[in-house]
Image (cartoon, rainbow, N blue to C red):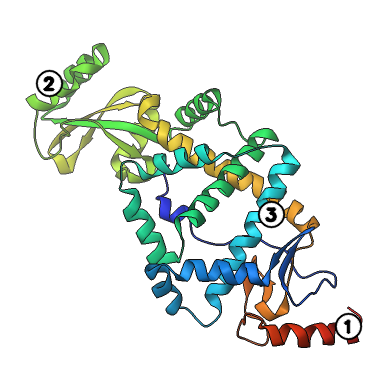
Amino acid sequence: MRRRPIVSLLVLGLAVVGLAGCRTSPDVAAYVGDDRVGVTELQDAVAERLADDDVAAYAAGQDEGAFTRQVLDLMIGERVYDAVEERYDIDVTPGQVRDRITELLAGEDEDALFTQLAQQQGLLPDDAREIIRELLVREQVAQAEGLADLTDEGIQAAYEDAQTAGGQFDLGYITVPDQATADAVAAQLRADPTSYAALATQYAGTYTLAAPQLRTADQLPDVLAGPVQGALPEGVFTVAVAETGGVVVGQVSFPPLADLEDDLTGQARQDASDAAQPLVDDLEAGLDVTVNPRFGTLEDGSVVAGDGGVVQILSGDDTADDAADGAAAGD
């Protein structure tokens, strides 16, 4: 269990539903329920982002129209998550978003992060904040619907489950010359687990760890796998290992909650986000999200290039022509 870097949390990929109904207007880029993304609004949003040199360089390296579709994805997602907040009566505040970003930064420079996001993903700081808001919305939905428990009590329960499962543990081992010495060292460790450091110093060598290290079962050599599993969640074992030229005395213990809390919390949040996604998808389906074909089509959760290929911002002349065509078609 390891926290994901913040950049990996901000990879775009908003889930949207397929085209439904006949809702078309030349001055609308997308419909999201009763809300809409206007063509002028989309134009302005694209222009705002391209005013940033790093974002402009990113967009220049994309296929023609791809950046416009990316911005439209963001704008659709913002409206979908507004509806999710209203449906589940939750409210993610700017302060909560700021706190999560600070936590994810873990002391790294915020400006450097935003520069990286602009260069690598074409995101402005407000885009990054919106994606984090959506992540927090999913977490709160999961909490509200009983699909996750992100409280201190929930993390404590997850810690106890992890302890029982034995997926992670602290392992120290000291290699001594013979079984008699191993039995004596093992007895001392059982009587006083804190004596490990002194014993490791006394029997220092290639096959002795100076201090226990956090390990997972798949990191164990075969010769230690069985003894470790037998000693979990806490215990001491001895095993003769020919390669070491002696007997290994192992000490197994489960890390304290403080050592695993960040990992457990990160995993719980990810599980909560995953659990809430189907609820978001269901609500989104009911919104009848519809994209103007001039900007692409909805496929696998994103706005992609339509059969015509290139996404084009509608000009005034295009708008007039399309309006006439729509009237003639009866849409």
Is residue 289 rendered to the left or right of residue 61? right
Query: Which kind of residue does numbered mark 1 sit on?
Result: Ala
Point out residue 63 in the picture as x, y percentages from the top left corner.
50, 81
Residue indicated by mark 3: 80
CB under 8 Å between callouts 1 and 3? no
Callout 3 environment at 10 Å: few (<14), some (14 to 19), or many (20+)?
A: many
Marks 3/2: CA–CA distance: 60 Å
- Which one is earlier in the sequence, the residue at label 3 or at label 2? 3
Residue indicated by mark 2: 198
Would you say residue 292 is visible in this rendering? Answer: yes
The answer to whether residue 206 is above or below residue 63 is above
Which mark is drawn over residue 327? 1
- Which one is earlier in the sequence, the residue at label 2 or at label 1? 2
**Residue at figure coordinates x 64%, y 34% from the top left:** 143
Callout 1 environment at 10 Å: few (<14), some (14 to 19), or many (20+)?
A: few
- Which one is earlier in the sequence, the residue at label 1 or at label 3? 3
* SS for callout 1: helix
The answer to whether residue 27 is above or below residue 124 is below
